[in-house]
């Protein structure tokens, strides 16, 4: 092992390589890869052709890469990552405090001593989202947090700048529509039963209220999966389901094995109207097929909203039921997946085989 990688063990290096192959933008700034044959270093999400593994070494900082004789890639500009990350972190703090539906980017840019264009580029580079999209996500998270802390719905709506509850959910949607009142019960008195089953791709946690499924998590550790559920509903009455949620679990596990849906599952979720539109569209993607983020955005009549679609996929709380794993990058590569890129690949491979090799 050379001096450049003495601080990165083989296990971590392998994780870095998987992130590089997947062009995982979430790893941008976490590490940098240097290509020995060109003496260039890049971000993990660089769109350039992937080098051979034997020609790659990893660095924790851009400074370290440059000290070992590598120069920044002109395509992905990894030398801008540190500055962009710091800029976005400061901006996010301001956005999180804003109650405006359409945050004034120019005002924030002036507060931070930068230009509007530079700030917009930094957001896309670091988060993959436009500032207004991140602001909406932060606002919804803040709204949910206030409800969990026991705030009245009207107070939470006012505090976070929502004009009315219809901006958060649609009353008429019985299947995809946990109301703020129901979510608020997650802070006090909400009853949530769960079951953890074993499937070919690992552990599957299914949690539901009396209205329907609220969470489907995938992983290797039952303890970690349950901890994530408690983190989402910290004051809820969470306990193993008395009936084992058998009718839900059997259906969900069957779907993880590539089988088509045999029954419709009721859902009990809190989401923005746009998130629900995306999730419904994902449920229309046939078994064994995939769509790109741009194609999903186009089908929603929002061709410029591919990054917002990606965000809705990333915040999907009911994997498998809402098959966000069927959405891929425009270049055909798999994007990040909350439950691991390997699981996404396995799900697609299994569904593709069960569907008879459909594309």
Image (tube, helix red, strand yellow):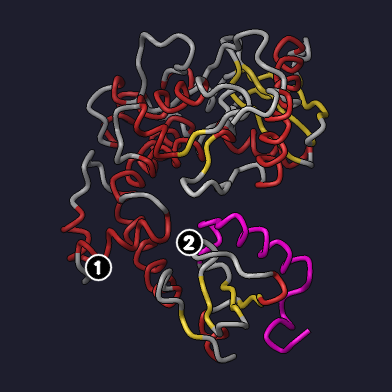
x, y percent for residue 197: 80, 26
Q: Which quarter of the rendering shows the C terminus? A: top right
Residue under the image location 39 percent in, 74 percent down: 80
Q: Is residue 226 left or right of residue 111?
A: right
x, y percent for residue 9: 77, 73
The reply to whether the magenta stretch includes residue 43 is no
The reply to whether the magenta stretch includes residue 21 is yes
Compare residues 11 and 259 and report the one nearer the observer: 259
Instruction: Describe the element under mark 2 as helix, strand or loop.
Output: loop
| Disc 1 crowd, CA 10 A, few/some/many (<14, 14-19, 20+) | some
Q: Kindly report the distance in space between the C-alpha atoms of the residues bearing marks 1 and 2.
A: 29 Å
Q: Is residue 32 left or right of residue 295?
A: right
Q: Which mark is residue 350?
A: none
User: In the image, which is nearer the foreground, mark 1 or mark 2?
Assistant: 2
In the rendered image, which quarter is residue 23 located in?
Answer: bottom right
Total marks drawn? 2
| Above/below status of 42 relative to 196 | below
Specify the principal SS of the magenta part.
helix
The reply to whether residue 184 is visible in this rendering is no
| Residue annotated with mark 2 | 47
x, y percent for residue 344: 66, 40
Q: Which residues are magenta?
A: 1-28
In the rendered image, which quarter is residue 304 located in?
Answer: top left
- Going from N to C along the chain, the mark reached first, 1 or 2, is 2
Instruction: Describe the element under mark 1 as helix, strand or loop.
Output: loop
Residue under the image location 33 percent in, 44 percent down: 133
| Above/below status of 314 relative to 195 | below
The reply to whether residue 313 is visible in this rendering is yes
Compare residues 314 and 257 and report the one nearer the observer: 257
Q: Is residue 187 left or right of residue 239?
A: left
| Residue annotated with mark 1 | 112
């Amino acid at each position: 092992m050379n001096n450049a990688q003495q601080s990165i063990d083989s296990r971590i290096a392998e994780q870095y390589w998987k992130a590089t192959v997947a062009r995982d933008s979430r790893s941008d700034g976490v590490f940098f890869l240097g290509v020995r044959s060109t003496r260039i270093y890049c971000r993990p999400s660089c769109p350039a052709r992937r080098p051979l593994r034997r020609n790659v070494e990893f660095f924790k900082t851009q400074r370290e890469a440059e000290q070992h004789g590598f120069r920044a890639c002109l395509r992905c500009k990894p030398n801008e990552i540190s500055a962009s990350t710091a800029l976005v972190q400061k901006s996010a703090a301001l956005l999180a405090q804003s109650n405006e539906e359409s945050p004034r980017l120019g005002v924030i840019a002036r507060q931070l001593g930068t230009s509007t264009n530079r700030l917009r580029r930094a957001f896309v580079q670091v988060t993959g989202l436009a500032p207004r999209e991140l602001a909406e996500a932060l606002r919804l998270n803040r709204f949910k947090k206030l409800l969990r802390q026991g705030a009245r719905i009207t107070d939470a709506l006012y505090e976070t700048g929502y004009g009315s509850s219809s901006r958060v959910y649609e009353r008429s949607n019985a299947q995809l529509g946990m109301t703020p009142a129901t979510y608020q019960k997650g802070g006090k008195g909400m009853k949530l039963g769960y079951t953890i089953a074993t499937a070919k791709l690992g552990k599957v946690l299914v949690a539901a209220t009396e209205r329907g499924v609220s969470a489907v998590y995938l992983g290797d550790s039952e303890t970690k999966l349950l901890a994530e559920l408690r983190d989402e509903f910290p004051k809820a009455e969470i306990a193993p389901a008395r009936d084992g949620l058998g009718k839900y679990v059997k259906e969900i596990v069957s779907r993880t094995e590539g089988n088509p849906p045999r029954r419709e599952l009721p859902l009990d979720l809190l989401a923005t109207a746009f998130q629900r539109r995306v999730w419904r569209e994902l449920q229309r993607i046939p078994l064994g097929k995939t769509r790109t983020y741009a194609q999903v955005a186009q089908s929603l009549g929002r061709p410029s909203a591919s990054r917002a679609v990606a965000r809705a996929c990333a915040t999907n709380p009911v994997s498998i039921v809402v098959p966000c794993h069927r959405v891929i990058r425009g270049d055909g590569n798999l994007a990040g997946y909350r439950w691991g890129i390997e699981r996404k690949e396995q799900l697609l491979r299994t569904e593709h085989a069960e569907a008879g090799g459909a594309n």
